[in-house]
Amino acid sequence: MRRKKSRIYNALKPAHLTAIGLVAAHWNSLEMMTIGTIADVACLPLASAVIMVSSSNFSAWLEILRKLTKESKQYAWKEQGLVRLCEKLQKLQTQRNNVVHAHWLEERSPGGMINSWIIPPQQVAKGVGVPKRGLKVFIPINLTAAQMRDIARLIQEGERELLSWL
């Protein structure tokens, strides 16, 4: 028996799915770079840093890194640059969450039938996000595959900036 096609293919095209994967992969790399930076600033083995921060969220990691930097003799002079970088990474986290955690909506024709040709890769995929904090219940998310790839590129740039900050 032939397997039924997932509804996600009515909401997203392969280009969108590839872009979502790029965002997730670059974010994972940034997370490991952040933990590695915490380890370097704290003069800890990487495994020890992973054990200490793995149950916390990314925002907490940035706060830990900022506190360690402020108290460090070696890195305290770089604190202002880190503050700006952390603000940038926080914004990227929001963008990443919008891409990776969105509930992507199927486009429907006015009569209610699903039309899988409505969203070509160069057009906007529509979804909703559910913020964990704040007063908004749902946030609309409208992104093309190209916009998703741009977010992945910005995350990659953020990782490079963190590496050069060291």
Image (tube, rainbow, N blue to C red):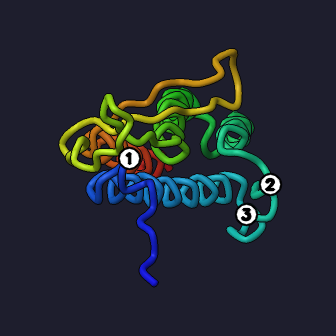
Residue 134: x %, y % from top left = 69, 19
Pick the residue in front: 96 or 46. 96
Residue 55, image x and y in percent? 80, 54
The answer to which of marks 3 and 1 sits earlier in the sequence is 1
- Other-residue count near label 3 (Cα within 10 Å), few / some / many at <14 / 14–19 / ≥20: some
Check disc 2 and report the residue beneath it.
55
**Rendered residue at 64%/56% (across/down):** 35
Decide: marks 3, 1 in contact (CB < 8 A)? Answer: no
Residue 11: assigned label: 1
Q: Choose top left, top right, bottom left or bottom right for residue 51.
A: bottom right
Secondary structure beneath label 2: loop
Alpha-carbon distance for marks 2 and 1? Answer: 33 Å
The residue that disc 3 covers is: 50
The amino acid on which the numbered mark 1 sits, given as a three-letter code, is Ala
Q: In this view, does 131 lie above or below 51?
A: above
Residue 92 visible to the viewer: yes
Which is closer to the viewer, label 2 or label 1?
A: 1
- Of callouts 3 and 2, which one flags the residue occurring earlier in the amino acid sequence? 3
